Image (tube, rainbow, N blue to C red):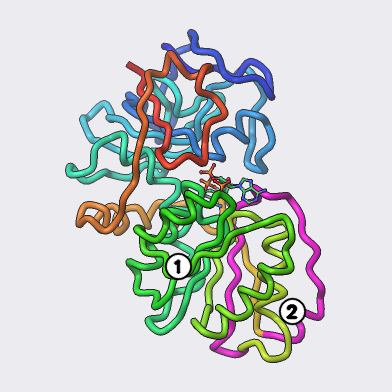
Amino acid sequence: MRAAVVRAFGRPPEYGEFPDPEPGTDETVVRVSAAAVQAITLSRAAGAHYSSDTKPPFVAGIDGVGTTPDGRRVYFHSPRAPYGGLAERAPVAAARSAPIPAAIDDVTAAAVAVPAMSCWLPLTRVAPVGPDTGVLVNGATGGSGRIAVQLAKYLGARTVVATGRDAGRLEALRSLGADELVPLGADPAPLRATVRGLARRHRIRVVLDYLWGASAEAILAALGGPDAPSGPERVWFVHIGGVAGPTITLPGALLRSSGVTVVGSGLGSAPFPEFLGGLAPFFEAFVAGHFRQGTEVRPLAEVTAHWGRTGEDRRLVFRPA
Ligand SMILES: NC(=O)c1ccc[n+]([C@@H]2O[C@H](COP(=O)([O-])OP(=O)(O)OC[C@H]3O[C@@H](n4cnc5c(N)ncnc54)[C@H](OP(=O)(O)O)[C@@H]3O)[C@@H](O)[C@H]2O)c1
């Protein structure tokens, strides 16, 4: 079959031949119709993601959309290594696929699934949104952050605060439901002061953090302190992505002196079916018109030329044929 093959970590995948997959026990071979490039797609291909589980050569792509041999349209995640989503076919465990409603096309489903899973569980299970509370999305200008802003609003957050680096993309979030926009600059001090004021005014009780690094430190400092809410009113800081850096400095006193609770959400933080389970209600809401997601479609044969592109307003999606 034809696939995007990673031949060395740190080099873009090449479009070429890869052995056809055979189904293993409890697996089906999905004929892939669309697979998006997410941040995790790139970091796994670079061997840099904590979930990376194989060495080159392997097929790039963590997920995709396609058809099973018995004709079901499915979204699938984590094909068996060394296979991946950016290929004509992928061997997928039955428990790692979910049906897609007819009203969502393959390309859109491929584009929104990972962003949706990044925030559905945090906002419905880890730190459910209350009707009178605010949600802050740190790194809202990325593809996942944009979906998170829309989901927080859809789930009934009173106020959604969005932070981001790119001024144009940040401003565009107003039309997706963001009520307050906070630009991220090189100096974290103004961010800390701004978030402190917004947190009190809008009762921010949930932070979805896609960045980590200096902005996460500043937001945690703003939310903590002796006058911060505690008990049932506590603030849940949910770490989801590390675009701005792998580590932060977190003063222990901040955790001891406030109700701020730091948790993570990602592959490994909950059983995988729980992440996948969020897709059905998300897709239902998508079909009802509550979300917007742009896409750019390219043939898989062009994968090398477009490798490395993420974070754009329109999600890049490859089609194998
Ligand atoms: N745990 C999970 O379940 C899960 C799921 C999905 C994604 N993620 C992770 O979440 C992160 C974001 O994902 P994504 O899909 O939104 O990625 P994305 O679409 O590639 O967007 C990344 C955004 O990060 C911003 N950025 C890059 N460097 C930055 C910096 N130093 N400071 C501030 N902003 C910076 C850019 O925003 P500007 O345009 O403003 O420059 C870019 O648009 C990634 O680490 C990804 O792996 C985790």
The mark total stands at 2
Q: Is residue 194 above or below residue 106?
A: below
**Looking at the picture, which amino acid does disc 1 mark?**
Leu
Label 1–label 2 contact, CB within 8 A = no
- Per the rendering, the mark at residue 123 is 1
Q: What's the amino acid at mark 2?
A: Leu
Q: Is residue 252 covered in magenta?
A: yes
Whether residue 21 sits left or right of residue 30 in the image: it is: right
Quarter of the rendering containing residue 275: bottom left
The correct choice, above or below, for 264 with respect to 179 in the image is: above
- In three-dimensional space, the C-alpha distance between marks 1 and 2, rounded to whole angstroms, equals 21 Å
User: Residue 38: percent from the left, percent from the top?
Assistant: 50, 38
Q: In what quadrant of the picture does the C terminus appear?
A: top left
Label 2 Cα crowd, 10 Å radius (few <14 / some 14-19 / many 20+)? some
Residue 256 lies in the magenta stretch:
yes
Q: Is mark 1 within 8 Å of ligand 1?
A: no
Q: Which residue is mark 2?
A: 255
Find the magenta span and give its range: 230-258
